[in-house]
Amino acid sequence: MTSSGDRSQAVGGTRSYEVRTYGCQMNVHDSERLSGLLEGAGYVRAPEGSDGDADVVVFNTCAVRENADNKLYGNLGRLAPMKTRRPGMQIAVGGCLAQKDRDTIVRRAPWVDVVFGTHNIGKLPVLLERARVQEEAQVEIAESLEAFPSTLPTRRESAYAAWVSISVGCNNTCTFCIVPALRGKEKDRRPGDILAEIEALVAEGVSEITLLGQNVNAYGSDIGDREAFSKLLRACGAIEGLERVRFTSPHPRDFTDDVIAAMAETPNVMPQLHMPLQSGSDTILKAMRRSYRQDRYLGIIDKVRAAIPHAAISTDIIVGFPGETEEDFEQTMRVVREARFAQAFTFQYSKRPGTPAAEMDGQIPKAVVQERYMRLSALQEEISWAENKKQVGRTLEIMVAEGEGRKDGATHRLSGRAADNRLVHFTKPDEEVRPGDVVTVAITYAAPHHLLAEGPTTRVRRTRAGDAWEKRNTAEAAKPAGVLLGLPTVGVPAPLPAVTGGCAPA
């Protein structure tokens, strides 16, 4: 018998799916692979806003926050009555929390059908089918990587911008981070495989790629080439049709002069750098096992600014790490004043079960952490606004996005990203502009977190990326009612804040 909630199966018995993603960029990229795997197995994406009204709901989890498990089990609890009403509905849990908790998930939420880890995402369709046939939960956690994620099918969220994973895992031992223990030691892809994937993406219309790794600039350590990352950046510059190259997230320890030179000398590598600081105090950096100190960090910033004067530099900062004194915090404030970040993702330290920091003495009272956080946020807001004001009067090329400007409809504007990744809202031109196209505008106003171009657009350049977006939307709009996948989220793959070695720092 079909319940009212089974309308997603209305067309030819097609089963629908929904993937909910938490955490870092690597999880976002993995979710694209999970979507591709499910679609390859015959599932269709549930319409936007289905809120659990799908035949398969997949949670791709993160384990870096203290309350990550509470959030997961709360969401699973809300789905339990829905699953009872809908025979045949399945729930799967993957990602870092699944890798860590394993059988605990099924014990606490026995209505879950599949639990899989970070190393075997390619098994999801098989595990779902096995759970259906055997009518019992399937828990399969691999201890090492079975297949590099980029060898799996994908359902990219953007028609013109794409993640390209160059490595997985992390060799760092930061005391606040559990992710290396869950994703394993660093494993690098062969450069030829990476470049082949990029060339294939460009052939499909992609014009911007983001190189992705938990410690992206350590690339090469697994293949014995210390300059492999800078060589890869330069090789990207030789790919015809590739307009923008970004990467995230680097680690100061591995950020070498050859990488700075490659950034400066490769035209399609964007003048943008996300460089996690975490703390400005040498004492706290040592306690975090961050293998650099304040002088080393500021030296990198100075070199980048000397080589790329217009570079926009962003960072991650943890406030209230165990043992942090007022003097330690003032050292962080000093670095922020000196570095003048375009943006800083600041986070209040919270315990992560299973990390050394969670057991350290000197845990800071919540009220103290909150007060420091507010001071740091106010300082960075002031700096961000001042740095954005320097953009007023400049003429910039903006790659048009969709979904970046929530008020665009009411303001008759469009939105996109400048080369340095600043968000720009601009007056909608008379001629048609599609996501992926490029416009030239003059900046007239600056706010702390965005820029405005209120005058006329001086140029609209239609691109192959815009063609790809239009083709994709036209094809999806033509799909029969009942199996619409919904409009894709297009635009630059949004850099999720708080990423250190591929994991959120707070």
Image: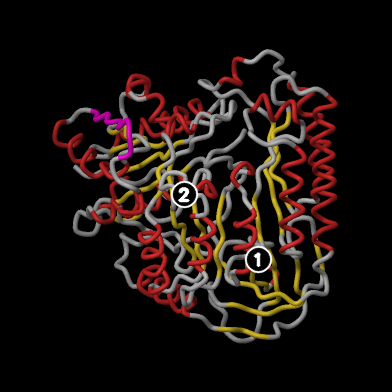
Residue drawn at 36 percent across, 31 percent down: 81
- Residue 22 - label: none
**Residue 366 lies in the magenta stretch:** no
Q: Nearer the viewer, residue 473 or 140?
A: 140
Kindly identify which residue carries mark 2: 220
Residue 45 rendering spot, x and y as whole percentages? 34, 55
Question: Crowdedness of circle 1 by 10 Å Cα count: few (<14), some, many (20+)?
Answer: some
Residue drawn at 68 percent across, 27 percent down: 286
Residue 6 rendering spot, x and y as whole percentages? 28, 47
Which amino acid, mark 2? Gly
Bounds of the magenta span?
Answer: 137-145
Q: Which residue appears farthest toward the left when viewing the image?
A: 133
Q: Is residue 107 above or below residue 197?
A: above
Residue drawn at 52 percent across, 40 percent down: 23
Is residue 104 visible from the viewing direction of this image? yes
Q: Which secondary structure, mark 1?
A: helix
- Residue 264 - label: 1
Q: Are marks 2 and 1 in contact (CB under 8 Å)?
A: no
**Residue 138 lies in the magenta stretch:** yes
Q: Is residue 137 above or below residue 456?
A: above
Question: Crowdedness of circle 2 by 10 Å Cα count: few (<14), some, many (20+)?
Answer: many
Is residue 407 visible from the viewing direction of this image? no
Q: Which secondary structure, mark 2?
A: loop
Q: Which residue appears farthest toward the top when viewing the image?
A: 361
Residue drawn at 43 percent across, 53 percent down: 165
- The quarter of the image holding the C terminus is top right
Q: Nearer the viewer, residue 69 or 421?
A: 421
Prevailing SS of the magenta stretch:
loop
